């Protein structure tokens, strides 16, 4: 099966884009779909489009399309809101499921926002909960009968290091803890099988590998047998069993719909729906194989040209996601110089240069050329130019 479909993306001429792990490229169908929603649906039908264009069903429809890519059954994934909100929903529900336990376990490699949401929830509940943070390698040993929920990001956002999802999920369940996986850097990059995994919750964003666009809605997965037990703390009207009954009390929907909160962002959801067309016939195992070929080639090419850079990602392909990171003391300036010379990656403090590999629009020639350009930036000290030293707000 051919994974490469570069012709279906609107990529600038002369640019090699290695930052799809942060913001995916623009699918060509997305612009047409957004224009259609705004002009033909909103512009012509106005408020009637909630019914005539079936806007109300879009969050679940898109959720099912994402579900296919992460091994989730129909009716178990809902889209909307932001990833931070979905983390909050999953974590609150997990604590509710284990009312006698007080420990939320996470690791120091988790994305900061996930930990911020946990900290905020703990303050709100004010019931002596503890966010216990351990090193990634210590997660297994730290799962005990004290732990209510294990909350981890599958692929480390800085280095791409992968947690062993089946092993950790099994350990959590062996101690009767609830498992929450953040798939922000996994959905659209790795073959994930939530049905086989058995985790209670998974969350993720859609603007990275799924190419849903900046600010694209997040998703939440709830294991189907649990949905009727969840009483959402964020009890928004869209999660009500009959939103337009306008009842004064909250009565949750008897399906994944109860994980909806507020009015969905229809234009963004429509763009995401169009972006998912690209994935319609993609085999995730084949995509993963292609990703490992590209990322392995990049490591070889960069290390041959730039011995001063230190590989920060696991060398073994099975232990990293679809990104490669190199540490360099002057990584920010080097990345700005690289971008200025037509290769786009990004930087994470304190010294990480990140590169994402998306086989839908990258091939081996792109990878070799990117490594050649990085070699010039490093070996010719192009990064020393004054214009690359001032940090922008977004790195």
Image (cartoon, grey):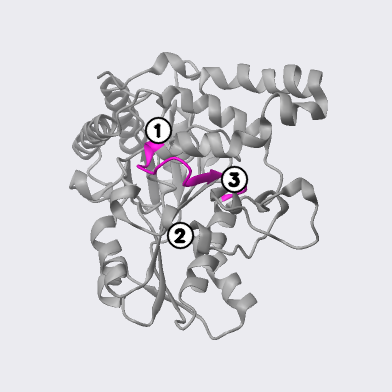
Which residue position holds label 1?
18
Going from N to C along the chain, the mark reached first, 2 or 1, is 1
Q: Position of residue 237 (x, y in %)?
A: 72, 52
For residue 376, side relative to residue 333 (left or right): left
Residue 269 in view of the camera: yes
Front residue of this view, candidates 369 and 362: 362
Q: Residue at x 30, y 62 (%)?
A: 169
Q: Which label sits on residue 226? A: 2
Above or below: residue 301 compared with residue 171: above
Above or below: residue 373 compared with residue 324: above
Q: Which label sits on residue 243? A: none
Which residue position holds label 3?
392
Q: Residues within 10 Å of mark 2 (few under 14, many from 20)?
A: few
Q: Nearer the viewer, mark 2 or mark 1?
A: 2
Going from N to C along the chain, the mark reached first, 2 or 3, is 2
Classify the position of the N terminus by image quarter: top left
For residue 304, side relative to residue 28 (left or right): left
Tell me which secondary structure the magenta stretch mostly adopts: loop
Q: State the separation of the CA atoms marked 2 and 3.
A: 44 Å
> What kind of element bears circle 1?
loop
Front residue of this view, candidates 282 and 340: 282
Q: Residue at x 46, y 47 (%)?
A: 76
> What kind of element bears circle 3?
loop
Q: State the separation of the CA atoms marked 3 and 1.
A: 19 Å
């Amino acid at each position: 099966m051919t994974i490469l479909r570069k012709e279906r993306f609107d990529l600038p001429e002369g640019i090699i884009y290695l930052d799809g792990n942060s913001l995916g490229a623009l699918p060509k169908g997305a612009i047409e779909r957004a224009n259609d929603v705004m002009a033909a649906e909103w512009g012509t039908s106005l408020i009637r489009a909630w019914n005539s264009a079936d806007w109300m069903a879009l969050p679940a429809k898109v959720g099912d399309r994402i579900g296919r890519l992460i091994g989730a059954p129909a009716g178990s994934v809902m889209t909307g809101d932001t990833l931070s909100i979905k983390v909050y929903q999953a974590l609150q529900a997990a604590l509710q499921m284990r009312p006698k336990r007080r420990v939320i376990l996470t690791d120091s490699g988790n994305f900061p926002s996930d930990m911020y949401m946990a900290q905020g929830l703990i303050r709100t509940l004010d019931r002596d909960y503890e966010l216990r943070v351990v090193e990634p390698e210590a997660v297994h040993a730290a799962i005990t009968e004290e732990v209510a929920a294990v909350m981890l990001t599958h692929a480390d956002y800085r280095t791409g290091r992968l947690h062993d999802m089946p092993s950790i999920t099994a350990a959590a369940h062996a101690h009767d803890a609830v498992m929450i996986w953040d798939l922000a850097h996994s959905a659209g990059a790795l073959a994930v099988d939530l049905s086989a995994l058995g985790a209670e919750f998974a969350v993720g964003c859609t603007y990275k590998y799924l190419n849903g666009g900046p600010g694209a809605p997040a998703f939440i997965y709830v294991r189907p047998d649990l949905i009727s037990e969840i009483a959402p703390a964020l009890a928004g009207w869209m999660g009500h069993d009959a939103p337009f009954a306008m009842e004064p009390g909250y009565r949750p929907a008897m399906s994944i719909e109860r994980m909806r909160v507020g009015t969905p962002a229809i234009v963004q959801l429509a763009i995401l729906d169009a972006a998912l067309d690209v994935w319609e016939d993609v085999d995730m195992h084949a995509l993963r194989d292609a990703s490992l070929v590209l990322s392995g080639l990049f490591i070889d090419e960069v290390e041959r040209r730039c011995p001063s850079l230190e590989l920060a990602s696991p060398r073994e392909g099975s232990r990293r996601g679809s990104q490669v990171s190199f540490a360099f003391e002057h990584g920010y300036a080097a990345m700005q110089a690289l971008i200025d010379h037509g290769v786009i990656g990004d930087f994470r403090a304190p010294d990480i240069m990140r590169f994402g590999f998306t086989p839908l629009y990258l091939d081996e020639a792109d990878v070799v050329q990117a490594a050649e350009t990085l070699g010039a930036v490093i070996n010719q000290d192009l990064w020393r130019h004054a214009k690359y030293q001032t940090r922008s707000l977004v790195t």
